[in-house]
Amino acid sequence: MNNKLLLFSILVLISGFIAKVPFLFNIDPELFYPRNVGTIVFPTLITYLSLRYKFNLYSWLIYLAISFIPIIFLNLIPGGDNSDTFFLSSTHSLFFLLSICGLVYIGGIRGKNNKKIDFLHYCGDLIIMSGLLLISGGLFTVITIGLFQEIGFNIEDFYFENVVVWGLPAIPLIASYWIFNNKDLVSKISPLIAKIFTPFVFLILFIFSFAIIFSDKNILVDRELLLMFNVIIIAVLALILFSLSHINSSNKFQFILLFSLSFISIIDNLIVLFAISSRLFEFGITPNRLALTGLNLLVSFHLIIISKQLFLLILRKVNTNNVLNSIVSYLPIYVIWTSVVIFLFPIIFNFK
């Protein structure tokens, strides 16, 4: 076993050990996991990226220390099922920690735009490869538990506490290893998936946008529908970003499709923004409403920028790099807003 593979194996074991902490030290899992999901995944991922790009010890320690700031904060503030600010802080901390991985990947704050675009490639590939590993692991789990049940053994609790708890945290690391060491394979899978899903997502979003007009559900008062709409729009934004980073510059049809998708997403996002603003003025300011309003404003502006660049690209007035550069230059704004939600919202709203 070479040194790189040995270090990788140690990182996988560390992630698994952190995930196993509640079972080893009799800590309430419902208390531990919401506060420490980031602890399980990101410090080891940051370390793996630092090793891959040959960071010196000082640089690695700085990025590792920064990654523990939101983790320590989450473990210090009050939290629970009734704390909206805690939920917002814990979910937004994952994006903050991913941005630290991004800094390591691009070589620091002054990293070049082409490295930032590469990081978008990596994020998209990471999602796809992690998804494939999750599906494979899920099928293996169902088959294994089912086989033992057929012969009279119930191993479900044992399996989840001793196999799943070790396996799940390793998925981002294994996916990353797969991406970096099987580039020829990954470079074919990811663009293919993006190419297949983009037209289907556009069609579904287009039909959904019209269907909601005739639905009995009212987006202005239905909270669940409003949240679902938000999830769809954010997923579409992610798909646009990922697809753009994998499209051949000569594929004009794909650019037109992405422009159409971004345009209809702007319309839908403005509807959502209007609905959230209406709830904000009618029912008052809450952490969730303010966080969604801020996020939707950011996404609206981002989609407008992307749509403009895509339109110019279709007219051949800019190239693909111009579009991608306009995307990555906006990403720090998301990080700033994420930091505000993590660290200021709990204080502003008195940890409610």
Image (tube, rainbow, N blue to C red):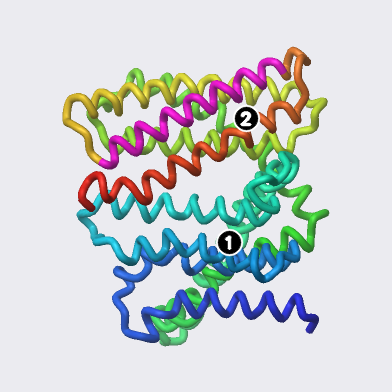
Q: Residue 13: x percent and y percent? A: 58, 80
Q: Is residue 307 magenta?
A: yes
Instruction: Give the numbered dot on residue 63.
Output: 1
Instruction: Residue 271: name its quadrant.
Output: top left
Q: Are marks 2 and 1 in contact (CB under 8 Å)?
A: no
Quadrant, the N terminus: bottom right
Mark 1: amino acid: Tyr
Q: Is residue 134 above or below residue 317?
A: below
Mark 2: amino acid: Pro
Secondary structure of the residue carrying tag 1 is helix
| Range of residues picked out in magenta | 287-312
Q: Residue 60: x percent and y percent? A: 63, 66
The residue pinned by badge 2 equals 199
Q: Is residue 351 above or below residue 322?
A: below
* Residue displayed at 35% across by 18% down: 213
Q: Nearer the viewer, residue 252 or 91?
A: 91
Q: Residue 29: x percent and y percent? A: 33, 73
